[in-house]
Image (cartoon, rainbow, N blue to C red):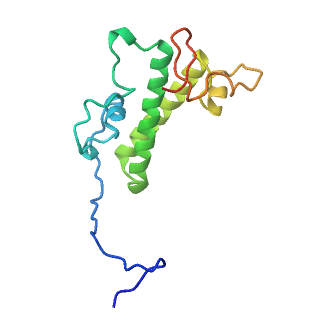
Amino acid sequence: MKEQNACGCTPQTLAMASVPMQEWCEPYDLATAIYSGTLFPCLNLNFFDAEDIPSPFRDKPAATKATEHEKALREVCKVGFAVNDLTLYLDTHPDCPHGIKLMKELLQQRLDGLAQYAGQYHPLTQLSIVTGIPNSNQYEWDEGPLPWDPFGSESEQGGLL
């Protein structure tokens, strides 16, 4: 007789998954990575054709060209996405020399990008207050738009995407 679980029903084994360990592959450039949803081409296994799905990271038509503010923010987002994706890889491959080298490069790129963005627009993180606006005498974390506010056409103020 099969055992019943806490709700009183008899569990059924439907399938058993086998997931192979990811191996290092040469990563995508950052624009391709964020569009593809992964830093690693070997993980980009298409489920369906997503060409018709709008993406905020795809180039906009000339009529709706992104502002400089929006372009700068997208660059910060691309690097942040790559750092997050690479973190997942390094969680399972903590001694991969390729991954460690790339992580150090991306973290420096992220720090530089956040500092540059904060200096031109407003801080995106608390760390940006120190790196991007070092001479400020006030706490400016609340400067700038809320993340869900869209970029406005009349001003350079706006949210993340």
Which residue in the rendered view is the most extreme toward the bottom?
1
| Residue 91 higher or lower than 149, as above or below | below
Residue closest to the eye, 83 or 63: 63
In the drawing, does residue 80 fall left or right of residue 133? left
The residue depicted at 65 percent of the width and 33 percent of the height is 126
The residue depicted at 66 percent of the width and 21 percent of the height is 133
Residue 41's spot in the image, x, y percent? Answer: 26, 41
Residue 154's spot in the image, x, y percent? Answer: 54, 8
Residue 18's spot in the image, x, y percent? Answer: 27, 64
| Residue 135 higher or lower than 55, as above or below | above
Which residue in the rendered view is the most extreme toward the front?
8
The residue depicted at 43 percent of the width and 37 percent of the height is 81
- For the image shown, how many numbered marks are present on the structure? 0
Query: Within the image, what quadrant is residue 131 found in?
Result: top right
Which residue in the rendered view is the most extreme toward the right?
137
| Residue 119 higher or lower than 107, as above or below | above
| Residue 109 higher or lower than 95, as above or below | above
In the drawing, does residue 27 fall left or right of residue 138? left
Residue closest to the eye, 75 or 60: 60
Residue 5's spot in the image, x, y percent? Answer: 44, 80
The residue depicted at 30 percent of the width and 58 percent of the height is 21
Point out the image quarter for the N terminus.
bottom left
